[in-house]
Image (spheres, rainbow, N blue to C red):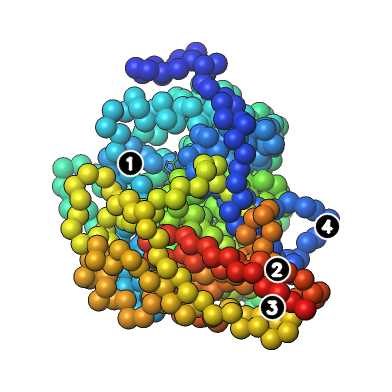
Amino acid sequence: MVNLNWKGKKETKDVNLKAYDNKPFQVIDIYQFPNYDFKKEESWENLLIWGENKIVMNALLREFENKLNLIYIDPPFATGGDFNLKIQIGEEGYFLDNFAYTDKWEEGLESYLNFLFERLILMKKLLARQGSIYIHVDWHISHYVKLIMDEIFGIENFRNDIIWAYPAASVKTRRFFIRSYDTILFYTKSDKYVFNDDPNIYMEYSNRVKDALKKDEHGIFYYRGGSHNGKKLSRKVYVEQDGIFPRDVWNDIPYIRANTSEYQGFSTQKPERLLKRIILASTNERDIVADFFCGSGTTLAVAEKLGRNWIGCDLNKHAIHMTKKRILNLNQSNDILNWKKKYQKEPKSFKIARIEKENKINSIPILFINSKSKEGKNLQIEESPNLNVKIHQNGNKISIELIDYDIPFIDLISDKIKENVNSFSDWIDYWAVDFNYKKEGFKNLWFSYRTPKDREISLNSDIFQYNKPGNFHVVVKTIDIFGIELTKKYDIKVT
Ligand SMILES: C[S@@+](CC[C@H](N)C(=O)[O-])C[C@H]1O[C@@H](n2cnc3c(N)ncnc32)[C@H](O)[C@@H]1O
C-alpha cells in the first residue's frame, strides 16, 4: 500500500470525530411549502447549514452516519487566490465584487492536505454503504487528493478520474500549454453502489457523428446500412438513443457564463448540467445528496429539481443567503431535464440552521467601507441598523409595510455605495414576516427578495388572516446588502 505523507499528518484513528456532537444546531429559518407535490408520505425537510464544515459534519454524524447517498464537494483547490461573489445594490443592481473565500494556505500545502484529509474521513463516515463521493479539484492538487482518497476509501473503490474539459478563457501564456480542465475524482464506499444508465446523463453525439447521421420525420437519428446474408444493404438503421453513454472525458458541458439565467454571481460557480449527470447517475429519487462546500448552491438546486433530498453547508453567510434565494427562486430557473422550459415548481420545505451561537457583532465587508483598514477583511460594528414598519390591522387581517431602514454607521460607508442608494429600500436585499412566531424558529410565511435578474422588492407584505382570536407575535426579518440580519418583534391582539 502506498500512502502519501506530509508534515503534521494525523493517523486516521486520531482524527477527532464526534468532538462537537453535543452542540445542537440552532434553526434560524423555516420555509414550508404546502403545495409541494409529495409523491408519498414523507417528513424529510432539506437542510442548509451555515458553519465550518468539520464541526457541522461532526454534528451530523449523530443522525446521518452511513445515511448520505451522494456527496459532491468542490472545495478550495489550494490555488493561492481569493474568490469573490457579487453583491448587488437596489433596483439598479449596481454590483460589487465582494470577498467570498480565500484559497491561500499560508502554512503551505501540508495545512491544505490536513484540512482536506480530516474532512474526507468525516465524509466517509456519513456516506451510505451504497453511496458515492465526487471530489472536484484541478491540477494544483488532484494528484495528492487521489492518493488520499485511495487511502481513505480504498483503491478498490476508485471508479473514475473524470476530466471536465471546458474551453479556456484567453490565456496569454506561451510558456506551457493552456490548462483547460478540472478533475472530478469519483469513489464509492463499497463495490455495491448505485449507478444508473439513464439517457438523461448521455453525452450528445459529436458534430462529426451528427453530420454522418440523418434524422427521420420524427427527429430520430438513423444511418443507412445493415447487411443480409453477407450483402450490404442501404436501409434505415436507427441509433438507440439521442447520445452516447458518457466516457470519463466530459467536454460537452460549457463553463458557466454571466449572461445565463443560472448565473448567481459566484466566481467559482459550477454548471447545473455537471451536477445533473452526477446526481442522476449516482442517486435515485429521494436519496440524500450533500455538499459541504456548497457556495452558490448548485448541487442543492439540481438535487431539488431532480426530486432528491439535500443537505448543504457553507462557512460564508453570503453564500448561504445566495443559496437560499436560489432555492426560493427555483421555479424561474431552467428545468434540468428540459432546459428550454422553466422549472415552475415550488421547492420542498427546508430549514436553515447554524451551529454557533448568535454573534451580535455585525461585520461589514471591507469593500463597503470608506477607508480600508489594513488588518482583516471586514469591519466589526456593534451598532445595528434601525428598522421601521407600519402594521396594518383590520380585525383578524394584518399586513406589514416597510417604511424605513436607517444605517447609523453611514459615515463609514463609501461614497460609491451611497451614490447607488436612492431610497431606504435599496439597503434591503431580503425581508420576511412570521405572523405567528413561536420559539421553534422563524417561519418565513411571507417574503420578498431581489435576485440577480429581478431587482424589485415589495415593500408591502401580503395580507395574513388569523383564524382564531388571541395574542400573537409578529416578527419581521430583514437582510441587507452587508448581510446584516435584523429581526423585530411586535405583539398583536386579535379579538
Ligand atoms: C469552490 S466554492 C464552491 C462553489 C460551488 N460548487 C458552486 O457551484 O457555487 C467553495 C466554497 O467552500 C466554502 N468553504 C471553504 N472552506 C469551508 C469550510 N471549512 N466549511 C464550509 N465551507 C467552506 C467557501 O465559502 C466557498 O463558498
Q: Secondary structure at mark 2?
A: strand
Q: Secondary structure at mark 4?
A: loop
The residue singled out by tag 1 in the image is 103
Gap between marks 3 and 2, in whole Å?
Answer: 12 Å
Circle 2: residue type: Phe
Q: 96 or 458: which is nearer to us?
A: 458
Q: Which disc number belongs to residue 472?
A: 2
Q: Is residue 132 visible?
A: no
Task: Answer few, some or many: residues within 10 Å of disc 3's Cα (few below 14, many 20 plus, some between 14 and 19).
Answer: some
Q: 142 or 23: which is nearer to us?
A: 23
444 versus 319 height, above or below: below
Q: 170 or 410: which is nearer to us?
A: 410
Relative side of 270 to 35, left or right: left
Relative side of 175 to 309, left or right: left
Circle 1: residue type: Asp
Which numbered disc, 3 or 4, marks the residue closer to the eye? Answer: 3
Circle 3: residue type: Phe
123 versus 441 height, above or below: above
The residue singled out by tag 4 in the image is 40
The residue singled out by tag 3 in the image is 464
Earlier sequence position, callout 1 versus callout 3: 1
